[in-house]
Image: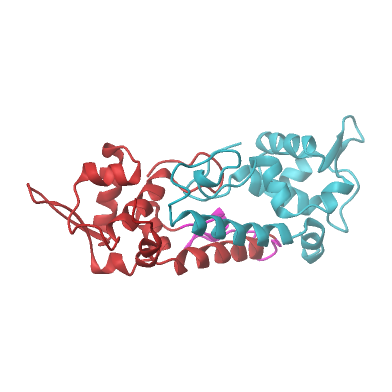
Chain colours: A cyan, B red
């Protein structure tokens, strides 16, 4: 959604998305939470966060209901999601280098000694992010937050 | 130097920087190489590449000499450099998330369950990039390139 501040940096949108998902998955979190309450929990501006929530909703990771008793709720799919799934729901697939973009082919690939290193670096990072489950992270959260 | 196309993506400048360094470290590469020859080897536009070469030179990874027999040459330090050192010479330190920027502190750090995951994902990626030595990658390169 927005541009990172430096090379290889997560967008703020994806950062906020992860924060929100962990909050929504919290064991002591009430069923539905309003946008202002979520914005406070994620230290995020409401207007920006509402776009993040739209992306999470489109991906089926949360659901929302309008009206007085409305708000945002984590879905069953959201509960089992990894940090990687949350990031990709917001930013699209992670590609450390253009040469790793799925469906595109780099003419240098066959002879480029850097290509396998990019691929290996990306795999190492994605593995960590795909093993981090939102619901497990929410359990680690201190009750004060 | 330039902005990446998506989240967590290397800049084109750093990508070209790695290509150039591998070319300069090649066992069959002549001692000094001109900008047009380097641009061809890296599939990079000359004007853009000259900025990349300036950054590599400032970092002591290459040296340059003006004049008819001039050109660019890898330095002793460049020969032992890793891909990570080349990237950071061009883009500055890699930080997957704002909360990992050295010298800055995130107020959420103490209670944020995502923070250690970002740190671990970054470490996994940087380890791969710091183990990939330019001179070893240059040895793998096929002679046709």
Which residue does the image show at 79% across and 60% down from the upper left?
A138
The reply, left or right, for residue B100 in relation to residue A64 is left
Indicate whether residue B3 is drawn in magenta: no
Can residue A119 be seen here? The reply is yes
User: Count the marks: how many?
Assistant: 0
**Which residue is farthest left?**
B68
Q: Is residue B55 above or below residue B105?
A: above
Residue placed furthest toward the front: B144
Query: Can you name the residue that lies furthest to the top here?
Result: A67
Per the rendered image, the range of residues in magenta is: B94-113
Q: Nearer the viewer, residue B66 or B54?
A: B66
Quarter-wise, where is residue B46 in the image?
Answer: top left
Residue B35: percent from the left, percent from the top?
A: 21, 44
**Quarter of the picture holding the N terminus of chain B:** top left
Asked if residue B110 is positioned above or below residue A63 in the image, the reply reads below
> Is residue B21 shown left or right of residue A116?
left
Main SS type for the magenta part? loop
Which residue sits at x=64%, y=57%?
A: A126
- Residue depicted at 78% across the width and 38% down the height: A59
Residue A144 shows up from this direction: no
Side of A144 where A46 appears, left or right:
left
Judged left or right of residue A98, residue A65 is: right
Q: Residue at x 38, y 56 (%)?
A: B142
Where residue A87 appears, x then y in whole percent?
67, 47
x and y, in percent, of residue B12 in the image:
41, 44
User: Whole-percent x and y of residue B103?
Assistant: 47, 63
Residue B108 part of the magenta-drawn span: yes
């Amino acid at each position: 959604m927005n541009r990172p501040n430096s090379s290889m940096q997560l967008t703020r949108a994806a950062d906020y998305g992860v924060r929100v998902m962990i909050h929504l998955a919290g064991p002591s979190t009430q069923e539905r939470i309003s946008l202002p309450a979520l914005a406070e929990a994620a230290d995020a501006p409401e207007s920006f966060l509402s776009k993040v929530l739209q992306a999470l909703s489109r991906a089926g990771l949360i659901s929302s209901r309008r009206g007085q008793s409305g708000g945002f709720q984590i879905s069953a799919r959201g509960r089992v999601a990894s940090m990687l799934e949350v990031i990709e729901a917001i930013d699209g697939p992670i590609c450390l280098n253009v040469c790793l973009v799925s469906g595109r082919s780099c003419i240098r690939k066959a002879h480029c000694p850097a290509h396998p290193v990019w691929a290996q670096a990306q795999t190492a990072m994605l593995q960590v992010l795909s093993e981090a489950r939102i619901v497990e992270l929410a359990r680690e959260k201190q009750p004060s937050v």
